[in-house]
Amino acid sequence: MEETKFGRILVAVDGSENAARAAKVAITLAEKFGSELIVCHAIQTPFYSFTQDGLAVPADVLKEYVDAAREDAKLMVGKLVESAKAAHVNASSVIQENAFSVVEAVVNLAANRSVDLIVIGTRGRTGFKKLLMGSVSSGVLNHANCPVLVVR
């Protein structure tokens, strides 16, 4: 039987403990298979920032939110890329801003980069405890065109 190869692995992170566990698994797999690792984070535009008549949140407040989210993302993703490189994994980062949907951002990035495996944690920052799996991980699992590994 032929061994499965993962030439390119994408790990989606959001700063949660489950995402950190998923990143560790992704780094381990990338090291084992000699895979390229893409660490991504999507900055979702707050859904309440727009109304039928235009912008509901003042532009300067929205800009502050995006600027802070961008800086947080750079630190989080940068730390994981450095951890991967310390494990001798070829790693890069992608921060997607103004994502309408995190699921769509992850799935599209995976398709555009010809990713062989997506690794994602369950229940991120939103913590819907009544759900078996988080809405993002569930959405990625249902819409991705490649295998998805969900890490608890």
Image (cartoon, grey):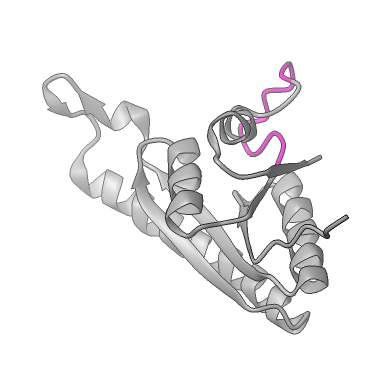
Q: Residue at x 63, y 52 (%)?
A: 15
**Quadrant of image for the C terminus:** top right
Of residue 44 and residue 133, the one placed in the foreground of this image is: 133
User: Based on the displayed image, in which of its 4 quarters is residue 3 positioned?
Assistant: bottom right
Q: Percent x, y for residue 60?
A: 22, 49
- Compared to residue 134, the image places residue 80 above or below, namely below
Q: How many labels were placed on the picture?
A: 0
Residue situated furthest left in the rendering: 53
Q: Residue at x 50, y 37 (%)?
A: 103
Of residue 19 and residue 56, the one placed in the foreground of this image is: 19
Residue 146 is left or right of residue 150, and the answer is left
Residue segment shown in magenta? 121-131
Inspect the magenta stretch and tell me whether residue 70 lies in it: no
- Compared to residue 39, the image places residue 124 above or below, namely above
Residue 118 is left or right of residue 66, and the answer is right
Of residue 119 and residue 117, the one placed in the foreground of this image is: 117
User: Based on the displayed image, in which of its 4 quarters is residue 20 positioned?
Assistant: bottom right
Q: Percent x, y for residue 134?
A: 66, 29
Query: What main secondary structure does the magenta stretch of the protein show?
Result: loop
Inspect the magenta stretch and tell me whether residue 130 lies in it: yes
**Quadrant of image for the N terminus:** bottom right
- Compared to residue 56, the image places residue 83 above or below, namely below
User: Based on the displayed image, in which of its 4 quarters is residue 6 positioned?
Assistant: bottom right
Q: Percent x, y for residue 16?
A: 68, 47
Residue situated furthest right in the rendering: 1
Residue situated furthest front in the rendering: 1
Q: Percent x, y for residue 129?
A: 74, 22
Q: Residue at x 57, y 64 (%)?
A: 38
